[in-house]
Image: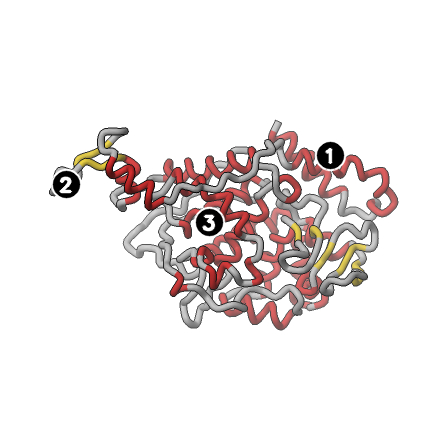
Amino acid sequence: MASATRSFARAGAAFKSTPFRSATRTALSAPRQAFRQQSRRGYASEGPAKSSFPLSIGVAALAVAGGAGYYFISQGNGSLLSGSAKETAGLFTPTFDDYQKVYNEIAERLEEKDDYDDGSYGPVLVRLAWHCSGTFDKETGTGGSNGATMRFAPEGDHGANAGLVAARDFLAPVKAKHPWISYSDLWILAGICAIQEMQGPVIPFRPGRQDKDAAACTPDGRLPDASQGNKHLRAIFGRMGFNDQEIVALSGAHALGRCHTDRSGFEGPWTFSPTVVTNDYYKLLLNEKWNWKKWNGPKQYEDKTTKSLMMLPTDMALVSDKSFRSFVEKYANDESLFMKDFANVITKLFELGVPFAETTEQAPMKFKPTA
């Protein structure tokens, strides 16, 4: 059933990017809604549970309750520690299977929770992983996914991070169940899981990120400003070490999700299939006619045909700039190439600034999608 849904989703998404869409948009409105429902793979309606049980209290309680559950004798003092206490005490060495369990737990929650945009938390999990990584500065070595400093007010309140509390709350029960994993690794693993479960490429994962305190928060302004153009894109991404091809490949993440007036000020999705990883973003940039949207919000574009899609000034910079456009054309014409390049560059983004142990010769983990 999953494979049939995947084939239908890709066929539907490809059809909506053809020149015939204008003449048939009225007749397609019902199938389009059906496609969105199919691409979400049937979620339940329960919202994300927010933990009201502080982790520190839970650890203390587990340490006291020595006789309840499994335990081991720690070396040196013979004290009894429960299994969960062992994990939080740093005496637990996770294996691939442990990380796969975390992946599966996130995937299961993606299946169950449909009370978010277009019926999926997948896109906002990708955005969380992207934004916690996109603060890296290669000159100072600060920022990046190592630290998960968005947990704290200085960084969590940055305008570019508005709305990401939904993703962090979604992952809170997973963190509570697997306290051994750092927030930093969890957020990246969640982004990888979301990409793969939304029919994207397999993304390799290397653990080893360590959480930091509020003192490590990055200054505001390190993430892209959607109202800007090509010079801004090269400045922001160049600070992280990305070239033109990588900038365009990373921008393909805009195939997912949508903007909100109460967050960025912008409104609407980029594609007709915002919960499926495709190359439609590039196709629409080239094949659709885009006009300035007439409204009271910030400057953004809307498609002439349906007026239901949007593009940001930074998106349109990818087709007005000759170098950027050459890669947009390549990815619009070759989805396999896009998937390959996207997997490579998103892996690079997720690992910026992470001090992986040099003595660890561990091959990157690749998780099997559940869909």
Q: Secondary structure at mark 2?
A: loop
Q: Amino acid at mark 2?
A: Gln
Residue at figure coordinates x 69%, y 51% from the top left: 269
**Mark 3 / mark 1, whichever is N-terminal:** 1
Q: Amino acid at mark 3?
A: Trp
The answer to whether residue 150 is left or right of residue 286 is left
Q: Position of residue 49 (x, y in %)?
A: 50, 39
Quadrant housing the N terminus = top right
Q: Position of residue 25 (x, y in %)?
A: 84, 43
Q: Position of residue 126 (x, y in %)?
A: 55, 49
Residue at figure coordinates x 57%, y 57% from the top left: 162
Relative to the observer, which residue lies in front, 184 or 35? 184
The answer to whether residue 219 is left or right of residue 76 is right
Residue identified by numbered label 3? 187
Residue at figure coordinates x 79%, y 36% from the top left: 30
Q: Secondary structure at mark 1?
A: helix
Residue identified by numbered label 2? 75
Distance between the alpha carbons at the discs numbered 2 and 1: 59 Å
Residue identified by numbered label 1? 34
Relative to 168, does residue 156 appear above or below in the rendering?
below
By what rule are the colours in the image chosen? secondary structure
Q: Secondary structure at mark 3?
A: helix
Relative to the observer, which residue lies in front, 192 or 128? 128
- CB contact under 8 Å: marks 2 and 1: no
Distance between the alpha carbons at the discs numbered 2 and 3: 33 Å
Distance between the alpha carbons at the discs numbered 3 and 1: 31 Å
